[in-house]
Image (cartoon, helix red, strand yellow):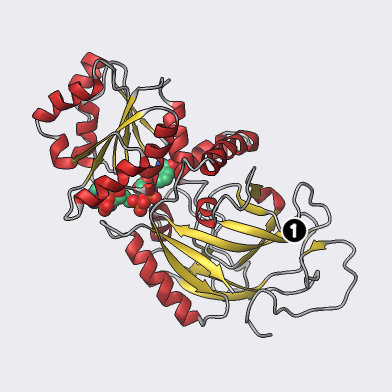
């Protein structure tokens, strides 16, 4: 069989009464599929490779999906390195010679076929993964319908980039702003890694909810450009890491806060900078760590603990997903999609990675590995997003 594209498939003439399918699709259409897999942990650009296979005949409770776009997030790379808590099992279910796992945790896909016992989905629906660790760096997947979830209110006002990246970064920003401290209009939040994709959503969601943000970024030659961009998203104040640790910043912050209490700090980076954030928190403030981009441990100073009862927390969106209902997740997606439709959430800064369905394995691997390397190098040009294209 030729592996040329989604529409060019091996058609077998048999009754189609038991499955709902897209045009040209049959129960044994053996859709040609490719996945970015790894057989052992290691540097992503060294261990990832393309595996070619065909989708199996559809099972009664399964859906067949075709991926449209999927990002390369830092956690995806950590997963391939074997240093992330979610470790998808290595197996030969895709017909590989050796056990492999498929990379990627989030993305948006279109339903192309439904098993006859599947309810609540239609062919053509856009779906996201119901949990992390199921593998999204692939053109197609056959999986139980329970492993995918609809995006409420999804329509053409919501871009593929937004849909492909909704479950991790905007959701993390939303939860952290919502779940730790009861914030009122005009209250301030401080965060580091403010130009990360999560940071950009913290700025925008906070702005949409009437909150103010103090944003810490690393210094760089084009700092003014970055400040201008973050301000255009709604950032209230922007500081570099060096400025944050200066004594005079304390009085500057006091002026900005103008009597309001700073009770939420969001830490993407770790190390010395994360420690500094904690020093600015007021009584009973909460310091929430969700990333460790500097790979440096964070010291917890005694004074804020003793004298201000500041508490230190962690947030992991995968844990939130596992411990909350599908309805609660849908409600959050609904709120985020409303903000997108109102023009209050812009896409994160991103760069396109093209995965042409008819490209050679070599071409796909080269483009993908380049993107993975860019994704894990600091001072990058934005989120790498893979588009699966005809
Ligand atoms: N816990 C959760 O549920 C959750 C959810 C989503 C994301 N995350 C984590 O959040 C972090 C950001 O994710 P993302 O997708 O938003 O990332 P991203 O868009 O790729 O941005 C990476 C950020 O990290 C900064 N950075 C990179 N290397 C750094 C270093 N050595 N020191 C200080 N800052 C550095 C970058 O700043 P420069 O521009 O200065 O390089 C940028 O702000 C990652 O650790 C990710 O795993 C966690």
Residue at the spot of label 1: 123
Q: Quadrant of the N terminus?
A: bottom right
Mark 1 element type: loop
Question: Which residue shows up at 69% across the image and 70% down it?
Answer: 55
Residue farthest along the left direction in this orientation: 247
Residue 76 quadrant: bottom left
Image mark count: 1
In the rendered structure, the answer to whether residue 46 lies left or right of residue 317 reads left
Q: Nearer the viewer, residue 296 or 377?
A: 377
Question: Which residue shows up at 35% across the image and 60% down it?
Answer: 375
User: In the figure, 190 relative to 367: above or below?
Assistant: above
| Percent position of residue 158, x then y | 56, 50
The reply to whether residue 294 is in sight is no
Residue farthest along the bottom direction in this orientation: 2
| Label 1 within 8 A of ligand 1 by Cβ | no
Q: Nearer the viewer, residue 102 or 354?
A: 354
Q: Quadrant of the C terminus?
A: bottom right
Residue 369 quadrant: bottom left
Disc 1 packing (10 Å; few <14; some 14–19; many ≥20): some
In the rendered structure, the answer to whether residue 228 lies left or right of residue 386 reads left
| Percent position of residue 197, x then y | 38, 48
User: In the figure, 301 relative to 70: above or below?
Assistant: above
| Percent position of residue 243, x then y | 14, 38
User: In the figure, 377 relative to 330: above or below?
Assistant: below
The reply to whether residue 386 is in sight is yes
């Amino acid at each position: 069989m030729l592996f040329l594209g989604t529409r060019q498939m091996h058609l077998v003439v048999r009754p189609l009464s038991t499955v709902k399918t897209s045009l040209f699709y049959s129960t044994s259409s053996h859709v040609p599929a490719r996945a970015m897999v790894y057989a052992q942990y290691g540097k992503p650009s060294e261990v990832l490779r393309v595996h070619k296979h065909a989708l199996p005949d559809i099972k009664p409770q399964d859906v067949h999906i075709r991926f449209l776009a999927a990002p390369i997030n830092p956690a995806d790379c950590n997963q391939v390195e074997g240093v992330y808590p979610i470790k998808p099992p290595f197996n030969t279910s895709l017909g590989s010679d050796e056990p492999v796992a498929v990379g990627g945790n989030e993305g948006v896909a279109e339903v192309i076929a439904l098993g006859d016992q599947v309810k609540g989905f239609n062919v053509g629906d856009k779906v996201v993964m119901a949990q992390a660790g199921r593998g999204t760096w692939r053109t197609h997947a056959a999986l139980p319908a329970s492993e995918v979830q609809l995006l409420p209110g999804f329509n053409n006002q919501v871009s593929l980039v937004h849909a492909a990246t909704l479950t991790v970064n905007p959701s993390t920003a939303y939860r952290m702003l919502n779940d730790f401290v009861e914030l009122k209009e005009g209250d301030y939040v401080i965060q580091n890694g403010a130009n990360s994709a999560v940071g950009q959503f913290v700025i925008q969601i906070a702005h949409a909810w009437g909150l103010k943000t103090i944003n810490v970024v690393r210094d760089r030659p084009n700092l003014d450009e970055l400040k201008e961009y973050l301000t255009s998203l709604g950032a209230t104040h922007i500081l570099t890491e060096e400025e944050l640790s200066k004594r005079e910043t304390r009085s500057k912050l006091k002026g900005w806060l103008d009597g309001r209490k700073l009770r939420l700090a969001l830490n993407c980076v770790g190390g010395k900078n994360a420690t500094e954030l904690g020093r600015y928190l007021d009584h009973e403030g909460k310091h929430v760590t969700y990333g460790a981009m500097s790979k440096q441990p964070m010291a917890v100073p005694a004074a804020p603990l003793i004298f201000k009862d500041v508490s230190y927390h962690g947030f992991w969106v995968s844990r939130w997903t596992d411990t909350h209902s599908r309805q609660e997740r849908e409600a959050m997606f609904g709120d985020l999609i409303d903000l997108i439709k109102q023009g209050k959430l812009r896409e994160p800064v991103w760069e396109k990675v093209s995965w042409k369905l008819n490209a050679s394995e070599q071409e796909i691997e080269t483009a993908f590995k380049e993107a993975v390397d860019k994704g894990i190098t600091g001072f990058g040009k934005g989120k790498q997003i893979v588009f699966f294209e005809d």
